[in-house]
Image (cartoon, rainbow, N blue to C red):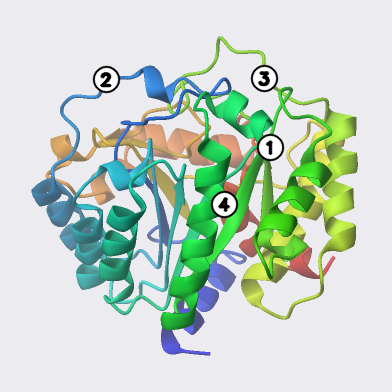
């Protein structure tokens, strides 16, 4: 276990016993550009202007050095030609950075993705994890994503990443399945279809989220997409029953996430009080800061604070958010972007 892994573990453990002085995870939407046409999300309808430049991101990274985990999201992250420079900015400034995670729709040119990913891997970040968005088998995925042939491109991307894993010990990938009304009951078929086409894939290589409605991220409050809770719980239980035991800390946290996802799906109740706005924050591509991807409560804008988070985290809005969390009156949410930090801040849940 290297020093940076110990660093993120020790920071997460501290969050069990009191308020952290700085967030250790950043959920950062680097662009809202997207080639998908998803029926569950309206991000692709945006025409973003005035997104943070690489120079602004460098300033932000230089002034906020506590991050040990960076989630780069979008939109489609590889549509930013400077994605490797964004990763470099945080790696240069955040000396304790252990992991960078990012989803992709697999629609960008594979040669470009490989080149940018090679550049990121060569920075020496201990762990880089790619999530391949996959919401169904074959035509179902293409229909949900609104792009013919998208499923085949996901499969091709998985095979490319398998090749890269042999060359880079710090690379891993998973398939990210978002369960909604559109693919209810199709998780097993989707997993089996992937296993037939990509050698060596196991149930541990699949991650499940439930579809969410968000005004400040997905802009999809007008869509009726939520899956039936009890049916969703059964599908997640199926996945849990097939997952092999692993002593890898990430896999242990994933198991805890899925077990609590079952509870959330069945009851609609958030399994435990979150660490949003404390252990992690959400930064959009225009510099707006929110407690989480799912919590439409703007805390401030980094451009107005010379790219420093501290004045925002000490502001009135942030204090009110923390009070809501203490009183358990926060918006109900259970997505991996925030749930992992919540689990690590309630570490006994990993053993439950």
Say which quarter of the image contains residue 245.
Answer: bottom right
The residue that label 2 is drawn on is 47
Whole-percent x, y for residue 22 in the image? 38, 59
Relative horizontal placement of residue 154, taking residue 351 as reference (left or right): left
State whether residue 346 appears in this view: no
Q: Secondary structure at mark 2?
A: loop
The residue that label 1 is drawn on is 136
The residue that label 3 is drawn on is 225
Q: How far apart are the two marked residues, 3 and 2, measured between alpha carbons?
A: 23 Å
Camera-nearest residue between 182 and 153: 153
Q: Which callout, 4 or 2, points to the residue nearer the camera?
A: 4
The residue that label 4 is drawn on is 155
Q: Secondary structure at mark 4?
A: helix
Q: Secondary structure at mark 1?
A: loop
| Sequence order check, earlier mark of 3 and 4 | 4
| Sequence order check, earlier mark of 3 and 2 | 2
Whole-percent x, y for residue 24 in the image? 42, 62
Camera-nearest residue between 304 and 40: 40
Q: How far apart are the two marked residues, 3 and 4, measured between alpha carbons?
A: 25 Å
Q: Residue at x 27, y 60 (%)?
A: 116
Dot 2 crowding, Cα within 10 Å, few <14, some 14–19, many 20+: few
- Establish if 10 lies above or below 252: below
- Quarter of the image with the C terminus is bottom right
Whole-percent x, y for residue 347 in the image? 69, 67
Q: How far apart are the two marked residues, 1 and 4, measured between alpha carbons?
A: 12 Å
């Amino acid at each position: 276990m290297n020093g940076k892994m110990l660093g993120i573990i020790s920071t997460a453990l501290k969050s069990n016993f009191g308020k952290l002085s700085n967030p250790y995870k950043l959920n950062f939407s680097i662009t809202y550009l997207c080639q998908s046409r998803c029926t569950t999300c309206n991000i692709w309808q945006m025409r973003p202007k005035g997104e943070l430049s690489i120079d602004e991101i460098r300033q932000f990274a230089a002034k906020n050095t506590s991050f040990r985990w960076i989630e780069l999201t979008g939109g489609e992250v590889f549509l930013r030609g400077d994605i490797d420079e964004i990763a470099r900015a945080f790696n240069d400034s955040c000396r304790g950075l252990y992991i960078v995670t990012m989803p992709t729709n697999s629609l960008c040119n594979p040669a470009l993705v490989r080149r940018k990913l090679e550049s990121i891997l060569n920075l020496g970040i201990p762990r880089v994890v790619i999530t391949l968005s996959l919401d169904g088998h074959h035509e179902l995925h293409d229909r949900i994503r609104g792009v013919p042939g998208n499923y085949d491109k996901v499969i091709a991307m998985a095979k490319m990443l398998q090749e890269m894993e042999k060359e880079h010990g710090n690379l891993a990938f998973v398939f990210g399945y978002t369960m909604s009304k559109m693919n209810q009951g199709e998780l097993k078929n989707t997993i089996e279809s992937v296993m037939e086409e990509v050698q060596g894939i196991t149930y541990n290589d699949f991650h499940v989220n439930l579809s969410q409605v968000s005004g400040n991220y997905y802009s999809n409050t007008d869509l009726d997409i939520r899956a039936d809770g009890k049916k969703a719980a059964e599908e997640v239980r199926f996945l849990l029953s097939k997952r092999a035991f692993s002593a890898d800390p990430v896999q242990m946290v994933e198991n805890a996430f899925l077990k609590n996802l079952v509870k959330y799906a069945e009851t609609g109740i958030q399994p435990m009080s979150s660490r949003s706005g404390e252990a992690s924050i959400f930064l959009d591509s225009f510099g707006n800061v929110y407690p989480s991807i799912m919590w439409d409560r703007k805390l401030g804008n980094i451009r107005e604070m010379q790219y420093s988070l501290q004045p925002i985290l000490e502001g009135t809005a942030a204090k009110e958010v923390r009070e809501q969390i203490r009183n358990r009156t926060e918006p109900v949410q259970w997505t991996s972007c925030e749930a992992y930090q919540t689990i690590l801040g309630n570490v006994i849940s990993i053993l439950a």
